[in-house]
Each structure stands twice: as structure tokens, then as C-alpha cells.
Amino acid sequence: MIGLPFAYAAAGLVFTVIAVSAAFDRSNRKRWNNAAFWALLAASFLFGDAMGDLGNGIAVLALAVIGGVLGLGRGRQGVSDEEERRVRARRLGDALFAPILAISVATFAGSLFLPHLRAGGRPLVDPAQVTVVSLTLGVMVALGLAVVLTRPPPLAIAHEGQRLMDSVGAAAILPQILAALGAVFAVSGVGAAVARVAGAVAPLDNRWAVIAVFCLGMALFTFVMGNAFAAFPVMAAGLGAPVIVRRFGGDPAIMGALGMLAGYCGTLTTPMAAHNIIPTALLELPPGAVIRAQAPTAVIVFCANLAIMAALVFRY
Amino acid sequence: MWPLLGVGLVLAGLALRLNPLLVVVAGALATGVLAGKSFLAVIAALGHAYNGARFISVAFLVLPVVGLLERAGLQFRAQALVERLRAPSLAAILVGYLALRQLSAALGLLSIGGQANMVRPLIAPMAEAAQAAGSGRPPDEATRTSIRAYAASVDNVGAFFGEDIFVAVGSVLLIQAVLAGQGLSVQPLRVALWAIPTAIFAFVVHAVRLAVLGRRLAAAGR
């Protein structure tokens, strides 16, 4: 069965190439730091399951030291001349859009058709990982198309990947480490502590106050964890199910749907979320720029969402 | 209550703008130790979760393709496309992508958009080109920053408030599973249905803000 290991092997290969390319980038005076950082990611994708929990933990510490103390640098390798790019663009025309669109189309088509493929009576692709497998295949198709179309010198593929990875820098691994932080929070009993605090703060005899504390708790806990999926089980067990539904007779589907959306308003405003970290790095924006663009929408939608829950949850 | 101290440490470190990578790793170690675990056990727990979350970083697979296309001048083709569309406004491009992103996410097609495979190579350059075409000169650095930040925000708002309308998506199934664990049975279809009012409201609010951004930048560009 084709599943995550396939995507991880591809990612491991890409990071290996990027690490080697970074090691040869003489224009970057911190090139060995960059090379070591990307090599650790390559090792994680290729051998992560064989490294053991402690081995992976030490790799995380090493990433933090390289990225946070020694620092990554940026070189000029792979930076192409603007006039050359203009000329190439004129020559290649709109065909340049094809590889980018191919990623989306192939991912979509893969998600539709791959689940139906069978080999020896078993599904060919792991049903739970169809999207990741499709994305990996889509990237392979797009890379093939891009090479055929633009005919780059072979080293350019490595240099371009390295240029973009170096521009993202150490922030690249932050979302994955934040997910690990969430797991450490969970096993350390943070969720139970938050539920106790929320239960102690909420005036449990007033149904409107309970709804407000529930939605605020979702947004704040999501802000801390960077992920609404981590907040929902805690808040649903602490207030949603026992108080809003059981005591006051609220509708569980409405409580669940609008509670999760209150959490998403928290995601839009938190520096802990991958959704804000990755575009900040990819678009080379100053810290907080993406959050500032989102925060007013998040606040307004949060208030409306709270009002909608108050209006509907006891009615259906 | 001790583990909450670890949460406070992480928040304080980020508020002080210390290096986030160090803050997060130190926060994880502190939280685990405060909860009474041994230092090595916390490192192992961190490593275990890190290894299990690798799927998050698979998204970077796209970058070599994006880099090759940028090398071949993708940014200039995006500009040419904007000019050929008879110069749509900045707001028109961003609201158009917001609608596309939210509708496709509502149909379960979350992987069609994205910051790496749509915003960086296409949407951000098109938005910058629209601003340049409108004001007759390339946008300055501060204007570019806000255009790109809003382009990123569109992808997030569209994805968040679209995906919850699709029945078979992670969040709806998570809500169903968590509530089932609390002894409450809910229909995924009803969970998805009740996400619609907030989704429509979120689209309207963000679209209005994009229109305001377009006007503000147009006024500043004159």
C-alpha cells in the first residue's frame, strides 16, 4: 500500500538535495549551519521511524540550537537576474502557468481516483493518506513539466529549491515543532487544567455567560496552542457537552460547529499557528504582518459567531 | 496547575520576541518537567510527537517547482495576465481568490489553493501587478508588504470558513468524534450545515475589508 512513507521518501530526497546544495553555497557565510539544518530534516523524513523517540527528541534540540542560537544565513546562489527572467517569461508565455495548475489538478484528480485503485484485493493507496500521496504525485508531474518547459541546467533545480528553503529559514520547522509542543502540553495535563479554570470562571447558572466563556475559551486556548483541533476536545468536555447541552438543553451540532469556528478566529490571530508562520516566511513578510491583516476580520467574525450561537443553540 | 506555568512561559517568550524556535522547545521541556516527568522522558515525548507530525512539513516539496518557475519568469507572466484581463483592481483579484478558495474548500477541495502553491507564485504577484497597473507605478515596499500580507490572509480566511461546510473533512469528523466520546451523537451533515451562516458572514467581512484596502491604496497611490 502506498501511503505516508512514499511522501516522506520524496520529501527526504528533496531535503537531501537542498542540504547538499546549501553546503556548496560559498556566498553564504553560515552555509554549514544551513546544510546541517536541512540535513536533519532530510534524516527525519528518511529515517525518522528508525531514530527512536529519544533520537528524534535530540534532533529537535539540535534544530533549535542551529536555528535559534547559531542561526541560518542566506547566500546569493540561485538568485537569477531580473532581465533574464523577463526574457524567459516572454519566450515561454502562458505555458509557465501549466506546472502550477498541474499540482492542483493532479491533487484533485488523485483524491478522486486513487481510492478506487486496488492491487491484489487491497487498496493500492492508503485511504487515509490519499491527499498527501496525490500532492506528492502532483509535485512530481509539475516538476517534470517545469523541467521540460524551461529546460534549466540540472543544478538549477537544486539551487532554486535551496534558495526558497533558505528564504523560509528556520521558521520552516516551527509548525511541526509547535504540533509536538501541543502533544507535550496534552500529556502534561494542560487541557485538564484549562477545563478546570474555564469551569471555575464561568457562572454556571447563566446560559448566556456559559456560551460566551465557551467561545472565548475556544479562541484563547486555540491562540495558545496554535490549533483549534487541540482546543475543541478540552472545551467540549469542560463546558460544551456537560453545561451547554446537558444542563441547558442546547443543540450539540450547533455547539460543535460554532465552537470550532470560534477557535478558527483564534487561529487567525496567533503567532503559534502554522497558517500564519508559513506565509510570513514564504512571502518574506515582517513578523505579525499576516496576523495584522487578519485580526480585524477575526474579531468581527468572532462576535457575529457568538451572536449566531446564542440565537440558535437553544432553538433547535 | 503547574503545567499552565509552561504555557505562560511560551506566551511570555513570544511576547518578548525571543527566538520562537528556542521558546517553543524550552517551553515544551519546562511544561513536561513541571508536570513531573523526567527530562529524558520529556525529550522522548517531544521527539515522538515531532516524528508523528512530519506530514505538516511535506508541503515544502512544492518549493523546487515554484523556484524553477520563478527562475523562468512566472512573476512577469502573472503581471502580463493581469494586464490582459484589462487590469482588474487589487480588490477584484483578492475577493475573486477568496470566493474561489472558500467555495472549493466547501466542496472538500482544500488542496487546490495554498500559500506555497498558489499565493506565493500566483496570487501575490497578480495582486501587486494590479496595484501597479492602477497607480501607474510599482508599489513601494510598505504597500507591497500589506498587499502580500492580505493575499496570505485571503487564503487562510477562505480555507478556514470554507472547510467546515464540507461533511467529510477533518474538523467535522473531529467534532463528531469528540461529542461521541461525551455520549452525544450528532449528524455530520447538521454540523456542516450550521457552519454556513458564519461562513457567509466571514466572506462578507473580509471582502469588505479587501475593498477598503483597495480604496486606501488607490488613494495613497495618487
Image (cartoon, coloured by chain):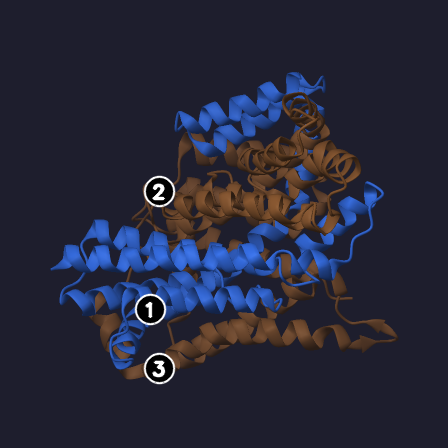
Write down the residue under mark 3.
Answer: A94
A97 over A36 or under it: above or below? below
Residue furthest to the front: A315
| Quarter of the rendering containing residue A232 | top right
Callout 1 amino acid:
Ala
Disc 3: which chain?
Answer: A
Asked if the residue under mark 3 is in contact with the one under mark 1, i.e. CB atoms within 8 Å, the reply is no
Q: Position of residue A241 (x, y in %)?
A: 76, 38
- Which numbered disc covers residue A73? 2
**Distance CA(mark 2)–CA(mark 1):** 38 Å
Near-viewer residue (A221 or A49): A221
Which hue is chain A drawn in? brown
Dot 2 crowding, Cα within 10 Å, few <14, some 14–19, many 20+: some
The secondary element bearing badge 1 is classed as: helix
Closer mark to the observer between disc 3 and disc 2: 3
Q: Share a chain, discs 3 and 2?
A: yes
Callout 3 amino acid:
Asp
Dot 1 crowding, Cα within 10 Å, few <14, some 14–19, many 20+: some
| Quarter of the rendering containing residue B218 | bottom left
Q: Position of residue B37 (x, y in %)?
A: 72, 20
Near-viewer residue (B184 or B135): B184
Quadrant of the frame with the N terminus of chain A: bottom right
Q: Earlier in the sequence, mark 3 or mark 2?
A: 2
How many numbered dots are placed on residues in this image? 3
The secondary element bearing badge 3 is classed as: helix
Write down the residue under mark 1.
Answer: B92
**Distance CA(mark 3)–CA(mark 2):** 34 Å
Which hue is chain B drawn in? blue
Q: What residue is at 56 percent from the left and 60 percent from the top? A: B162
**Distance CA(mark 1)–CA(mark 3):** 21 Å
Q: Position of residue A306 (x, y in %)?
A: 56, 43
Disc 1: which chain?
Answer: B
